[in-house]
Amino acid sequence: MSIDFSNQNLRNRSFQGQNLDEANFSNGDIRGCNFNYASLRGANFQGVKAGQNIKDLLLVLLLVIIVVIVGFHAIFQMIFSIITRTPEDPLWGFALALFISLGISGMILPITYDLNTYFNILSQTSIWKRIITSLSAGASGALMGFYYGGTAAGGENAQVAIFSAFVAAIVMSGGSFYLIKGIFPIGINTITTISAYGFTFLLLAKAAVYLSTSNLIPGIVLGLLSVLSIKLTFTCLTILFQKILTYRTTSFCGADLTNAIFDNAQISNSDFTGAKGCIPVLNHF
């Protein structure tokens, strides 16, 4: 006997892994529901409202705005403090450390994402995927901790800034490894995107300096790297938009939707990653 959920408000309920073959969800509100790895063979989703609650979307957008303001301020304050440094400068070590941290924070995730898109080298649950994300998050945490820890100490105590960077890196890396779903990864991806933009800006600025002083080889090399970095920055934006639009959305990841019915269903932004069977093509994320 099929289960009847028709015309019900089921928002944010979890049906993960359940056997719901031929269940009737018609004309129900299933926004935010978790159907991951459920068996939904022949289930009826006619006329359902799926996707994301407007409150959840507004919440995540507010988080992104706050992180953008905080992250952009910190990263570009540091960039402008080292942009003119040269290897002969006493602070060149700091400039190099910032450059490397920005590269790890901003580039490692989009590189992995693009490689996975073309070669499918990592599964959704791969431990390596979590390690890579943690590495990026740790670099992001180090950047934030160094700037705001140093600022809190009056900008004159390097030991406090370094200690703050270390603590923030551990917290962000650990949090990113274990909190792989929800709102935390969106904050991490926001900082990653800002770092990618900052890294690209730094590459372009250095390339322009070399080219303007007739140092053609390093200028051309950095210019070419800038083009790649621009592409990866857009990849970061793609990842961020995906996470925003799928935050607490209706999720059918890994579900069996064979012969499921979605006639007249509102399923924009629903997540069908890894689902099999009757997957609405226009809304497949």
Image (cartoon, grey):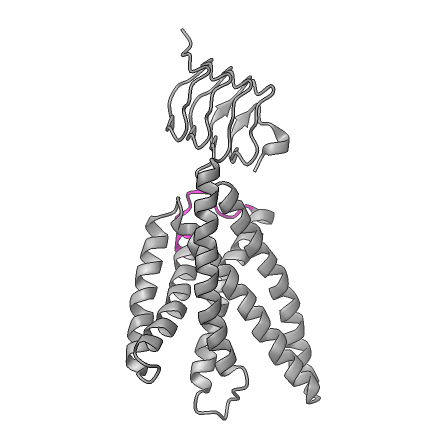
Left or right, residue 84 beside residue 187? right
Q: Position of residue 158 (x, y in %)?
A: 32, 82
Most extreme residue toward the top is 1
Query: On the image, which quarter does residue 268 sit in?
Result: top right
Residue 107 in view (yes/no): no
Name the quadrant of the N terminus: top left
265, above or below 140, in the image: above
Residue 123 covered by magenta stretch: yes
Read off the magenta span: 120-131
Q: Is residue 13 left or right of residue 239?
A: left
Q: Quadrant of residue 55?
A: top left
Magenta span includes 229: no
Q: Position of residue 216 (x, y in %)?
A: 70, 84
Expressed as whole percent of the image width and height from the top left, the position of residue 170 reads 31, 63
Give the total number of marks visible in the rendering.
Answer: 0
Q: In the picture shown, does residue 255 fall above or below 68?
A: above
Asked if 4 appears above or below 38 in the picture, the reply is above
User: Measuring 43% from the left and 46% from the top, which residue is drawn there?
Assistant: 59
Task: Name the quadrant containing residue 171.
Answer: bottom left
Residue toward you, 55 or 29: 55
Residue at image point 41% right, 28% down: 11
Residue 210 showing in the rendered view: yes
Q: On the picture, is 89 further left or further right than 223?
A: left
> With 219 as the anchor, is 63 left or right in this view?
left
Residue visible at 42% across and 15% down in the picture: 5
Position of residue 195 relative to residue 282, above or below, is below
Quadrant (top left/top right/bottom left/bottom right) for the C terminus: top right
